[in-house]
DNA sequence: ACAAATTAAATCGCGTGCGATACAATTACG
DNA sequence: CGTAATTGTATCGCACGCGATTTAATTTGT
């Protein structure tokens, strides 16, 4: 078995390419780019499905947390979604305007914002339940690949902040 | 070997979970969410590295195409980056202002916008060449996982538009 | 106890992404 | 040959993401 030294960030290369330091700057040798491109594609594909629920993708994953937890503070929500106050604050304002959530200060620690799901928000879940399958029908992937992808992505999410 | 029927979009589930139709709406059962979260994380991590080059991530991948092709029309650029005119037009304007590219109409077909790299744009490549390794040092992934990830992502990018 | 440090949210500004639309150049076609 | 359809680009409006900063509440250290 021939072992080739691999440089991080590169994908595939032959001998002659090893000698060109600029090879790493080609899009096809980048792993970050397809992650970015697929992410964009996912959000694009979700849009028409979520429009029926009057949700954007970010609002949708926020509601996912709410459907599961019913009540959560903004800090915890940020942890779940890997987002911060500067993204969440305006988003939560919109979800409140739509009537899917309510916001109130934590009586025990007034710094904390407690977010609760409303009756209307709960109802939305019934419409949302079909969305994952609808999307999956547009972007199919073998179950074992889903699992590999999942494990690798969470490994990447785990590293550092 | 026990075979369980798998529903698209779900990740892992036991018997009791199979019966709850709302399980699919939990964040941890979604494959799209970690893609989205990792993509955000990547762009976040690139930012301080790219600031030295006066580039955003999207501008950086655009320059990658330019470093490789030297000259390209907007349509082709969009194909390479999976982006459209509504994203590229303002971005190209900024890259032109920074002096990294020039724009001109194609004489043979005036609808086409031909983008060319400048001397200054070429120079930038020398600073950029270290960026991939810098990022890789922050987000490490075993080479075989990089390859799996790469193949799966391009499979997803290939499907449909 | 009280000033300093820390923490949680909110706000601001900028740069995307993209659906919708507009517009101009080119091509297709009856 | 002239009009309709198509194609490539640009513009507009909205909703993110996020670095930087601000504000208010709480905790820490002496």
Image: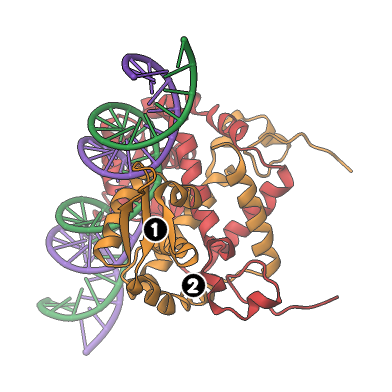
Chain colours: A orange, B red, C purple, D green
**Is circle 1 on the same chain as circle 2?**
yes
Gap in angstroms between the C-alphas marked 1 and 2 = 15 Å
- In the rendered view, does D21 fall on the left or right side of B122? left
B138 over A156 or under it: above or below? above
Name the chain under label 2. Answer: A
- In the rendered view, does D2 fall on the left or right side of B73? left
Residue B84 in the image: state x and y as whole percent: 34, 56
Q: Can residue B102 be seen in this view?
A: no
Q: Using the image as rendered, state which of residue D8 and residue A11 is in the foreground.
A: A11
Instruction: Please identify the quarter of the rendering in which residue C21 is found.
Output: bottom left
Mark on residue B121?
A: none
Q: Residue at x 30, y 29 (%)?
A: B99
C11 over B113 or under it: above or below? above
**Image quarter in which the N terminus of chain B is found:** bottom right
- In the rendered view, does B61 fall on the left or right side of C10? right
Packing grade of label 2 (10 A; few <14, some 14-19, many >=20) is some
Residue A65 in the image: state x and y as whole percent: 47, 61
Mark on residue A135?
A: 2
Packing grade of label 1 (10 A; few <14, some 14-19, many >=20) is some
Mark on residue A58?
A: 1
Q: Using the image as rendered, state which of residue B53 and residue B92 is in the foreground.
A: B53
Residue B70 in the image: state x and y as whole percent: 43, 38
Q: Using the image as rendered, state which of residue B25 and residue A122 is in the foreground.
A: A122
């Amino acid at each position: 078995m021939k072992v080739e030294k691999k440089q991080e960030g590169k994908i595939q290369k032959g001998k002659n390419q090893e000698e060109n330091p600029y090879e790493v700057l080609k899009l096809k040798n980048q792993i970050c780019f397809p992650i970015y491109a697929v992410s964009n594609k996912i959000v694009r594909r979700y849009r028409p499905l979520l429009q029926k629920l009057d949700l954007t993708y970010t609002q949708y994953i926020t509601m996912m947390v709410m459907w599961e937890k019913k009540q959560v503070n903004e800090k915890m929500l940020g942890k779940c979604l890997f987002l911060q106050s500067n993204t969440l604050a305006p988003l939560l304002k919109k979800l409140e305007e739509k009537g899917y959530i309510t916001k109130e200060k934590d009586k025990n620690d007034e710094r904390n914002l407690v977010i609760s799901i409303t009756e209307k928000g709960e109802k939305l879940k019934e419409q949302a339940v079909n969305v994952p399958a609808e999307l999956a029908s547009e972007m199919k992937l073998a179950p074992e690949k889903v699992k590999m992808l999942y494990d690798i992505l969470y490994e990447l999410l785990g590293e550092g902040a």
